[in-house]
Amino acid sequence: MKEIIKASNVSKVYNQGTNAAVQAIKRVDLTIYEGEFVAIMGPSGAGKSTLLNVLTTIDTPTTGEIMIDDVNISLMDEKKRSEFRYKELGFIYQDYNLLENLTIYENIALSLTMTKESKAEIERRVNQVAERLEVSELLDKYPNECSGGQQQRVAIARTLAIAPKLIVADEPTGNLDSKNSNEVMKLLVQLNKNETTTLLIVTHDSMVASYAKKMLYINDGVIEEELLRGNQTKKEFFNAIVDINSKEIFIEDLL
Amino acid sequence: MNIRRFSFTILKKEKSHNLFYMLFLIVSITFMTLFINIITDEMILPPTMNLDGIATGICMISLVIVVVIGFYAYNYFLAIKLKLIGIFKLSGTYITSMLQFLFTQTFSLYLVCIPIGILLGTGGSIIFSKFVYQISGVSYPGFQISLKATIYTLVIVLVQAFYLAVMAYGFIHRHEIKTLLGYQQSKEHGEEAHYLNFNFEIPSWLFVIIFVGALFLLATSKNLVENFLVYGNVVLIVCIGKIIDKFIPKINSYLRKQKCITDKINLITLANLDVTLSRCAMLLQVLSFGLLFTICYITAYAKSPGDLTLMYVVYLMIIIVLSLSIMYQVLMESRTRNKSFKQLAKIGYTKKEITSVIAKEVFLFYLLIVFLSTIYPITALILFVSSKIISAFLAIQLITFFLFVMFVTGIIVYQNYKNMIYQEIE
C-alpha cells in the first residue's frame, strides 16, 4: 500500500524556551497508508489534536520530519502547503466550521472554488453531493438556519465535493446525538470502502473509534497502543478499545 | 476575586476594544461641551451675532444626536460581553453582581473620559469663540470657562450614564442564556426581510428608482436649498435604509452566485460585506441625512459668518461622531470573523489571500458608504455652486473634509481588522 503520511521522530513543544514550555507530542513515528481508516484516541490534553494539526500542515513540528506523498512538508512554502490542504485534504470538525456569512450552497462550493473549477462544474458537483447527503433543500439557507446534524452533513458535503485523498476529522460526532452520529459514521465508512478515501479521526468515543480499521491510543504525547481491527467484528473491536481506554482509568483509580 | 476587581481585570484584557469606546466617549463629550457652551454662554458669540431660534434648535438637535449615538455605541460595548454575561447567568450569578460588573466597567470609563472630554470641549469653545470674534471684526474679550456649561454637560453625561445603566439592566434581563452564549449571534437571514408591514411586497428596485428619480426632480426644481432640505432628506430617510437592507443584498447575492462563485477572494469579500453593510444601515441613514441637512443649512446661512461657523461645527460633529461609530461598528463586526478566517486558513487560504479579502471588503464598504451618503450632498453642492448660492471653495472644503475623515477611519479599520485576524491565524 502507498504511504500517504509518514511522520518520523516528530515532537511539538509549545512556548519553547520559556518556563511555560509544554511538550504536546514526543518523538512520534507514524505511517498512514492509502485507504486506511485510523482513529486516534486518548485522554484530554494527550496531544491528539496537536498530532492531527501537525500531520495536516496546520501546525509545524518542533523537531522531526513529516513526508506527505513523499514530499517533506518542512520544505514546502506557505503557498504549497495551502495548495496541499485545499487539493488533497478534507476537514470535518466537531463544531462544523461552516462560514456563517455564506449560504450552504456557497459553503459546499468553496472547496471547488479554491481548486478553480468552472461555474458549471461547481454547480454540478454541489448538486450531486447535496443530493447524496440529503441537503439539497438547504442550499439557499445559511448555517444558522440549519440544525447541528444538517450542518455536519453540509460540512461532509463540502469535504466530499473535492474528493480528497485524506479526510481528517476532529471529534466529528462530538455535537451530535446518537442517531446523527451513526449516520455520519456510516457515511464516512462508505467513503472509505467505496472510494478508498483515507480517514484519520480523533475521537473520545469508543463507539466512533470502533468503525475504524486501526486505533492509536495516545497519552502524554506518546502513542502508547496500536490496535488493529483485523478480522474482529465491530463489537469485538469496540470491547478491545474500551479495555484500552478503561485501563487508564483503572490505573488512575489505583493510584 | 471580588466582582469589582474582576471587572477591572476584564477591562484590562479588552484593552483595544475599550480604547475605541473611550475614543468615542471623549469625542462625544467634547462636542456636548461645545454645543452646551454655544447654547448657554452669551459671551461665546459677539453681541451682534446672537443665535436665533433655528440655530439654537440645531444645536439642541446635534446634542440629541450625540446622546442617541452614545446609546448605539454602548450597544456594541455590551455586545462583546454577551458570552461572559451568559456564563454569569449560567452559573447562577445574582443580577446585582452582573450589574455591578457592568456598572464598574462603564462608570470607570466615564470617569476617565468626562474630564478629558470637558477639557477638549472647553478648548474647542475657546477656539470657536476666538474665530467667530475674529471674522466678525469685534475685539475678543477673552474666554471665561462657563461653570454653567460644565455643570450642564456633567448633568447630561450623568443622565446618559444612568440610562445606559438601565439599558444594561434590560440587556441582562432580556437575553436568554442561549442567546448570550452566542448561539444566535449571526445575522438573521430570512424571508421576512422582503416584507414591510403591509400586505404586499414592495420590490427593492422601487426604492432605487425613487432615490434616483427624486434626485433628478430636485436637480431641476427652482427652490434648490428648501427642496433639498425637506424633500431630499425625506427621500434619503425612506430610501437609504431600504437600499442597504434589501436592494444591495439582492445584487450581492446575484453577484456571488453568478459571477464570483469561481473567485475565492471575491466570494468571501462579498459575503462579509453583505453582513457589515446591513449592520451599519442605520448609521449610514443618519450620516446621509446629517450631511445633506447641514449642507443645506450651511448654504442657507452662507452669508452670515457666525451662523456659518456654527453650522460648520455641527457638520464636523456629524462627520466625526458618525465615522467613529461606523468604525467602531465595523471593528466589532470584524471581531466575530476570527473563527471564519481561521477556518479559511485551515482549508488553504494563504495569508496574502486573507489580507486581500480584508482589504477588498474595507475598500468596498467605504466606497459604498461614501457613494450612498454623498450622492445627494454632492449633487446639491454642484447645483448650489452653479447657482452661485455658495462658493466653489466652500463646497470643495466641505466634501474634502468628509472624504479625508472617511479615508483616515478606513485606514484605521483596515489596519485593526487585519491585525486582529493575523493574531488569530498565526
Image (cartoon, rainbow, N blue to C red):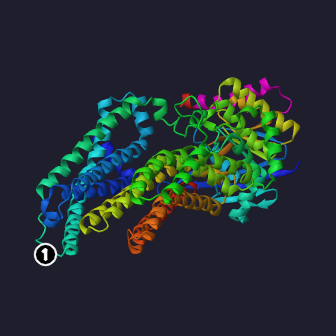
Q: Secondary structure of the magenta portion, mostly?
A: helix
Point out residue B293 in the picture as x, y percentages from the top left corner. 38, 55
Number of callouts: 1
Q: Nearer the viewer, residue B351 or B329?
A: B329
Q: Is residue B393 above or below residue A6?
A: below
Residue drawn at (30%, 33%) of the image: B97
Image quadrant where residue A9 sits: bottom right
Q: Is residue B281 left or right of residue B153?
A: right
Q: Amino acid at mark 1?
A: Ser
Q: Nearer the viewer, residue A59 or B267?
A: B267
Point out residue B6 in the picture as x, y percentages from the top left corner. 33, 43
Q: Magenta region: which residues?
A: A230-251
Q: Which residue is mark 1?
A: B139
Image quadrant where residue B150 sits: bottom left
Given the image, what chain letter belongs to the residue carrying mark 1?
B
Residue drawn at (65%, 25%) of the image: A177
Is A139 magenta? The answer is no
Crowd band around label 1 with a 10 angstrom C-alpha radius: few (<14), some (14–19), many (20+): few
Is A241 magenta? The answer is yes
Is residue B3 visible to us here? no
Residue drawn at (42%, 54%) of the image: B227
